[in-house]
Image (tube, coloured by chain):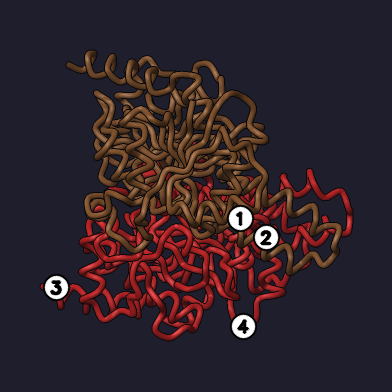
Chain colours: A red, B brown
Amino acid sequence: MRIAIDAMGGDGAPGVPVQAAVEALDQVDGDFDIALVGDPDAIQGELSAHKHPEKRLEIVPARDVITMDDPPVASVRAKPDSSLVRGVRLQESGEADGFISAGSTGAILAASILILGPLPGVDRPAIGALLPSAADHPTLMLDVGGNVDSKPHQLVQFAHLGHIYIQDLEGRESPRIGLLSIGEESEKGDELTTQAFKLLQDSDLNFVGNAEGGDVISGDYDVVVCDGFVGNVVLKFYESVAGYVAQLISRNVADAAANIDLQSVCRVLDYTEFGGAPLLGVDGVTIICHGDSPARAIRNAVRVAKHSVERNMVEHLSRQLSRLAQVEA
Amino acid sequence: MRIAIDAMGGDGAPGVPVQAAVEALDQVDGDFDIALVGDPDAIQGELSAHKHPEKRLEIVPARDVITMDDPPVASVRAKPDSSLVRGVRLQESGEADGFISAGSTGAILAASILILGPLPGVDRPAIGALLPSAADHPTLMLDVGGNVDSKPHQLVQFAHLGHIYIQDLEGRESPRIGLLSIGEESEKGDELTTQAFKLLQDSDLNFVGNAEGGDVISGDYDVVVCDGFVGNVVLKFYESVAGYVAQLISRNVADAAANIDLQSVCRVLDYTEFGGAPLLGVDGVTIICHGDSPARAIRNAVRVAKHSVERNMVEHLSRQLSRLAQVEA
């Protein structure tokens, strides 16, 4: 198995992705290689600072870079020799089994859809976020990627994508699916959610009803399904709250010992701890990391990508969604 | 001036609202009376435990109670002698200038709209929430009350309501208005927000652009405008995060001294500190408190209600929205 990493994506590139690759080879168990995709000289320069098993690490040259300012879809077409496009293409050609990037989310999404394609039965691939919850396992919220103005049946597709992901990656049988809404009762919500509620109720998923804003991280749901507008707002809000709380606490807690404990709290609130956001519903394994991901986050994403491949997640997603499409047809 | 308090609304009724009334008379400056609306015996029983200036506190009898389980609109019609309906009616008859309740939000909203009526030019009154922010003043987010499937021009009305509220109540000139969305650029967002963006840009408000989820509590915006679906989700999420963070911290910080400091942090995160959520766009002053409000929150709501009356907020709202309606016509 080989996992490709975009060596040029993210604020800390190429240093951070290269470090993450070396750490993953050392710390993630199992038989796998890594392909670092990007400018060979820059990658080699970073690698010289690290000891690593050379046989398990290949550099795949890519001379161009898609920046955060590049328009996503246009840049995927205009920059075929970018690390991002080359990295996604490695799955198309069978040279890699998964791809991780901390580059432009929009471009990763666009490249994955254009090159790998959506799975049969998937209208719109969705980005999932694993949110730290009050329970000892994270909650998968999807979509958080900006699939706006979703239709009710698309929320049901998201639910199926999340169902398989949690089963395969977290090993939880019969994941509890919640529909993000503004009241417990089925008739509470907007037009989208009240219609999606009925569809989810008629599905064979373990749909446990509406989840309100206060339930998202309660640990009572394994998957929370929503349109990408509200999902993205909640995700970004959550990230900002963690920083805000840390700021408030450091203002109030001068004690150094307490500060050390706070680091562990903030790490729990750091959802990159769970290894990035999976793009679900494309014909391949794509994991999107934050632009400011530390090496730890990208290293964890390697573990998630590896598990996704080992557990045949894409095949399971494909089977589930094809079945769903047949039922509907 | 007289402020009415629903003595039967909220988890701690009648004890908490009665205590809040007594505290407000003692601690809130200025020339005002309080009317406690509800079961006279129950209120009298609670009052006997408190010293209070009898001349400034009147009991207005109401024999019925609207519970959290009652259907909002139907119960307003079915229970004319409830504390909630009597309390709102006191403004209609001129016997009070404002009303505060920690009862059913839906019923308070319904009673205020049915009895006081919306202001001219307001399609849908909105509930605002004052969120603790990274700055030294809160951010007003509206609507958080469940006005779902809003139209673009209704978000513009919310912006005008928020503008006047922040000017009158917080004394901030030319409040910075943000539109909750999922990207900075005007074309980012869903159909609702991209259309509302244009309308806000053409308005004479100080519209500073889209606010992403991570910007809501940054302190960079005085007012964040959104549909009630996403607003309600974010509000409830925020409340739950505060509790979750407190839980994480108490797991990690055993030190008693640190625990004391944490109380102040959690109080800052407690948005009831700002005195409840104003219902904006009805012809009167209605303030909605949380069901589990402590006396402090209701006491603060008295201060907010009093300021709203003193500063002629309803007249200003009315003028602003009528002007807006004329421009559009």
Mark 4 or 3, nearer chain start: 4
**Tag 4's secondary structure?**
loop
Q: Which residue lies furthest to the bottom in this view?
A: A173
Q: Are marks 2 and 1 on the same chain?
A: yes
Q: Residue beneath label 2, please?
A: B246
B43 up-or-down from B95: above or below: below
| Position of residue A33 in the picture relative to residue B74 (left or right) | right
- Residue at the spot of label 4: A30
The reply to whether residue A115 is visible in this rendering is: yes
What element does badge 3 sit on?
A: helix
Q: Depth check: B256 or A57 in front?
A: B256
Q: Which of marks 4 and 3 is in front?
A: 3
What amino acid is found at the position of numbered circle 4 in the picture? Gly
What residue does disc 1 label?
B242
**Foreground label between 1 and 4:** 1
A272 w.r.t. B221: above or below: below
Dot 3: within a 10 Å radius of its alpha carbon, few (fewer than 14), some, or many (20 or more) residues?
Answer: few
Label 2 Cα neighbours within 10 Å, binned few <14 / some 14-19 / many ≥20: some
Q: Do labels 4 and 3 share a chain?
A: yes
Residue under label 3, please give it. Answer: A328
